[in-house]
Amino acid sequence: MKQKTQTEMNTKRKTKLRIITITLCFVLFLSTTLTIVFALVQTFTSPGTISTMISDIDSAVLMQEYDVYKLAVEHVGQDIIDEFGLNPETIENLMEQQFVDDFLSNTLVDYIDELSKGNENHSISIEDVLSILEDNITEIESVTGHQLTTENLENIEIFLYDSDIVETISISSIINNTQADLALVQRVLSPFTLLIPLILALLTIAVILFLNRKHLLLAIKDIGITLGIVGVIYTLLGLLLNTLLSIAVGDTSVQSLVNSLITQPRSIIITYGVITLVIGILLITASIVTRVIKLKHTQIST
């Protein structure tokens, strides 16, 4: 009777431990998922990734779908457009120039940096715009056939000061138009935010191993399965990203631009997913192989 009671107690302990372990594996699943999310945010907002994404934009698609020439006429004015000999073809050629890619990349990096600091008053300065024009007069002339003169630059400066373009593209204006929460954006962009789920994931793994110290191989396999599931989810997400975004966007006129923008992010998501999946598979394999070796060793001993 006592032996039966002891057996029942051991079974209950094992069941309780199993429930706790499964619960902790769910916590590990969530924390690992969030760790990868914030790691992706840090990677996507890095200067290198932004530069690649800007370079991947298809200028022809941008011109066709958004009629950049028409937008330029509306916001800058036909007189200035004509003064510099701009037309749809020259604007497209300008957008393909390296100095334009560099300017857009550096500007976006600056915006993200200022957003992470919570500085909503940041915007492109008029001096920055004039500087990019002055530093690339030769390239602009080779594309447009028009040489920028001191008078041209002065007219541009007057126009920028008289217009509200700089104010329109300020961080505060973007935040207001998108109704985004600046404090939330700042927290998401902060590299310290990544540490929270990462530390939670590591602590969860440590607790799982400690509670299952008498059954380490089973605990390692559970951890491997959990990480493997996360890896599969992110790998599939990366592989299906084009399809998912096409469904989400709906508007076919935007899809070509979106597809050119996500080339780099897509490969990064797949990379993170595959790395996590491989770690999971290695842990599962290690636990199974070790268990088989132990069983064979026990059989040989007996």
Image (cartoon, rainbow, N blue to C red):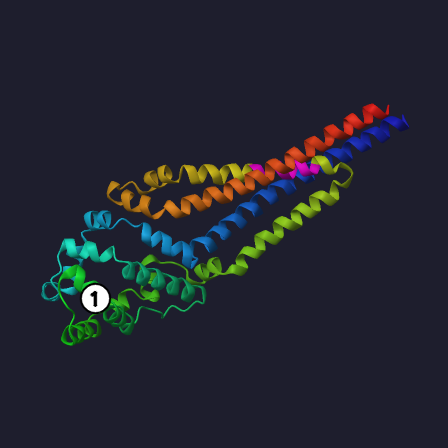
Would residue 175 be found to the left or right of residue 96 on screen?
right
Q: Position of residue 144 (x, y in %)?
A: 15, 61
- Of residues 192 and 284, which is closer to you in this image? 284
Q: Position of residue 182 (x, y in %)?
A: 42, 62
Q: Residue at x 36, y 46 (%)?
A: 262
Residue pushed farthest right? Answer: 2
**Above-or-below relation of 233 to 207:** above
Q: Secondary structure at mark 1?
A: helix
Q: Position of residue 208 (x, y in %)?
A: 69, 43
Find out whether residue 225 is within the magenta segment: yes
Q: Quadrant of residue 130?
A: bottom left
Q: Quadrant of residue 214?
A: top right
- Of residues 255 and 97, which is closer to you in this image? 97
Magenta extent: 219-228
Residue type of the residue flagged with mark 1: Thr
Where is mark 1, residue-wise? 138
Q: Residue at x 61, y 44 (%)?
A: 28
Question: Where's the N terminus, which quadrant?
Answer: top right
**Above-or-below relation of 163 to 25:** below
